[in-house]
Image (cartoon, grey):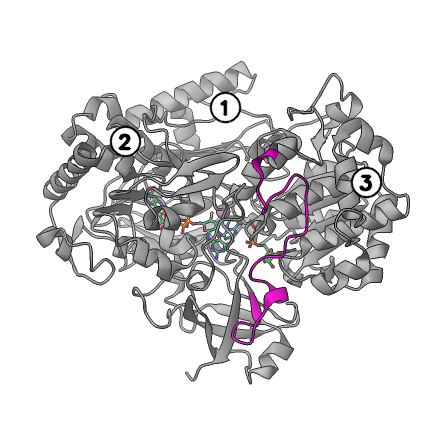
Amino acid sequence: MADQSKRHTKVTTSHWGAFEVDVEADRIIATRPFVEDPAPSAIAKAIPAAVHHRSRVARPSIRRGWLEGRRHEGRGSDPFVELPWDEALDIAAQEIDRIRKTHGNEAIFGGSYGWGSAGRFHHAQSQIHRFLNSIGGYIASFGSYSTGCAQAIMPHVFGVNFLSLLYEHQDSWQTILEHTETLVMFGGINAKNAQVSMGGITRHETLSWFDRFAEKGMHCLNIGPQRGDAPAGCDWMPLRPGSDTALMLALAYVLEREGLADQAFLQSHCVGYDQFRPYLMGESDGVPKTPDWAAPLCGVVADDIRALARRMATTRTLITVAWSLQRAEHGEQPYWMSAVLAAMLGQIGLPGGGVGYGYGAIGGVGKSLLGLSGMTLPQLTNPVTTFIPVARIGDMLRNPGATYDFNGHQMRYPDIRLIYWAGGNPYHHHQDLNALHDAWQKPETVIVNEPWWTATAQRADIVFPATTPYEREDIGRTNLDDYLFHMPQLIPPVGAARDDYEIFCGLAQRLGAGTTFSEGRSAADWTEALYADYRTAALEKGVLVPTLDDLKARNWVRLPIEEEGPNQTLFAPFRADPANHPLPTPSGRIEIFSATIAGFGYPDCPGHPVWLPPTEWLGTATEAAPLHLVSPQPGDKLHSQLECALADAAGARPAPLLIHPEDAKARGVNTGDLLRVFNARGACRARAQVSDAILQGVVALPTGAWMGRPREEIDPNGNPNVLTQDRGTSRLGQGCAAHSALVEVAHLRD
Ligand SMILES: Nc1nc2c(c(=O)[nH]1)N[C@H]1C(S)=C(S)[C@@H](COP(=O)(O)OP(=O)(O)OC[C@H]3O[C@@H](n4cnc5c(=O)[nH]c(N)nc54)[C@H](O)[C@@H]3O)O[C@H]1N2
Ligand SMILES: Nc1nc2c(c(=O)[nH]1)N[C@H]1C(S)=C(S)[C@@H](COP(=O)(O)OP(=O)(O)OC[C@H]3O[C@@H](n4cnc5c(=O)[nH]c(N)nc54)[C@H](O)[C@@H]3O)O[C@H]1N2
Ligand SMILES: [Mo]
């Protein structure tokens, strides 16, 4: 490292982009925007305060009740005892060994979902999975909270893996700019969310694309509960959350009814329209899916639906769907139905037409870059084959041995005795956190690696303090970005923090797997080796990547990998020649009806898209819970990260809740008032923000506020996950259904 006493400045990167860091006397004192970023995120401003925050875990800590008597109860309320590293590692290793010997590695849950930090070698998920594999395996998890439901349903429809659809196939921003005339955005395209991207987004360009769309005169329509989900200047069709499938069906009805559906495309490129059509027209169930049928369900005017359908059929139209639509009960349906609607328009495979998912959800979607194989720590193999869909952790802990359905398989929940988490915060990300708290008491031991005393760390038995990326050296690189960073160690580890790698080396060595895990390499050796492989793979593709020494000297480089020439268009070869470029579905075509899914026999996800109202939405609102709660991603941070620093600002917490003027008036609430948001599952505080940019009947409370003490009568900071319901999207996807929740709001005296 450079002279510690002097002030020096370096660039590093993060999930929300690159930034300059000023360091003086071993402390981060300021961050500044990266020179090449046209619209830098403000998130990095919280870094200096967060990295040196009082809520950092200073030393290895063990919960007193567990240390003294291996007592389960007291998670979240017991005090912690600090121990020296060697002693704490000995205790943890003995416990892991005891569990695996007594109950087998199937009793260890290492799914450990979460974003952790950017940086390729010190990626917490890769580290924990490699470690657990080196000691005999663990229960893993499938999918993500982001797109778990889509990852299950969309391969049935288009045949391709959902993530490769997103990142390798979909129309690029450039294609949209050049060809799209009507952009219909279900759930919007939100520049606030595009601030972040897994592994980093260096040039924030979402808003500049919309400026260019506006210049061109593109018609951009945001359909959803919040005007702010799309950039200013876009039109807004307010829609009740959870009702998108009804609206899409009504649009489809108009196309069929008015002879606007592309029958030739449906016959040549799709399978199953003949099974779907009788449902659409009401011949099979007596309910024609007309605009008049959908209007009251969606809160939309029937004539507006007709007009929109006609416009979509007569202009080059791209339908985009936010990930939020599938983070809801029956989230499979709007995803599948959007593909059917696009197929009926007959524009799939034409540039700027068809359908696309998650533009703006993260900054990397819509970039067209040359694919370079990644730089990832090999994870070894997991001898344990049982896994859970990621968002089913609560059910797993509650129901060991119980059977459940998932995407055509009958599965059984394992009996978990030990949870090990690194790089995630389930007390941020999971639903119905009061219920999770009860389930969380069951395992014998919970171990967490964390830089901060998050709600999850507070509910662990053993907490190992982990470094942040500023305290270690790494490489920053993702396939969704064209920059490459050397991320220098900027400051020494805060307190007694260690890198996850070092923590796992210590445990693996005690468990007789030291060499398997580390291969005798230091962190620097690994970085060198992974970088060398990456450089070779890039050179093979004709991309000249600097040597590691050169990169260290330069700190960052922009790689010449932006794709030129023909613009990326989803399924163009399939459209041009379906016989020679079939989709990898059973039929080789787009599956409007899926015999595979029909064969599963799931009432909550039958063989073609259908309207299935959620259990909780405005259609089932009650006096006790009359408002629909959406819990979007926070604009000021990434999930729960850096919250400790943000929450220190006067008046910053509880978090703001957006509420419509009529709903506010009915409750005597004004902007700035303290609120109680509640339902049968829990309650939290929030601060009212009255606005007509949200549909009446809907309230929005962002995620990310740190949860308070267990079973606190009212969560102090405004964590919406004390209110959300913990249920799978359906038997097919079993994804997270956070956006389906009803609540009530009341004025609370300050
Ligand atoms: N109600 C509701 N809930 C939701 C959602 C929603 O829309 N509504 N969205 C869901 C979605 S899409 C997601 S992706 C999840 C996000 O949920 P998470 O990814 O779990 O949330 P983060 O706050 O990013 O948690 C990452 C944790 O890793 C820690 N960390 C950072 N770097 C390191 C490191 O190097 N080592 C270690 N050991 N730890 C590190 C951070 O301090 C932080 O506590 O939330 C989900 N929850
Ligand atoms: N700043 C910031 N950006 C982020 C993140 C972050 O934590 N902070 N997290 C990142 C992650 S992990 C993910 S997965 C993505 C998530 O990206 P998305 O899933 O797109 O984001 P959300 O914020 O959950 O939801 C977007 C909007 O969808 C609307 N919505 C909710 N339900 C419905 C519905 O039923 N129908 C319609 N039409 N609209 C609905 C809500 O008004 C909400 O504001 O964001 C990423 N971007
Ligand atoms: Mo996510």
Q: Which residues are magenta?
A: 599-628
Decide which of 350, 51 is in the foreground and name it.
350
> Dot 3: what SS?
helix
Q: Is residue 418 magenta?
A: no
Q: Which residue is mark 1?
A: 373
The tag earlier along the polypeptide, 2 or 3, is 2
Q: Is residue 601 magenta?
A: yes
Where residue 351 appears, as percent x and y from the top left, is: 77, 34
Residue at the image position 23 percent from the left and 57 percent from the top: 75
The kind of secondary structure the magenta stretch mainly shows is loop
Amino acid type, callout 1: Ser
Q: Residues within 10 Å of mark 1 (few under 14, many from 20)?
A: some
Decide which of 447, 599 is in the foreground and name it.
599
Amino acid type, callout 3: Leu
Q: Is residue 131 left or right of residue 324?
A: left
Q: Is residue 449 above or below residue 349?
A: below
Q: Is residue 231 above or below residue 348?
A: below
- Residue 570 visible: no
Residue 613, quarter of picture: bottom right
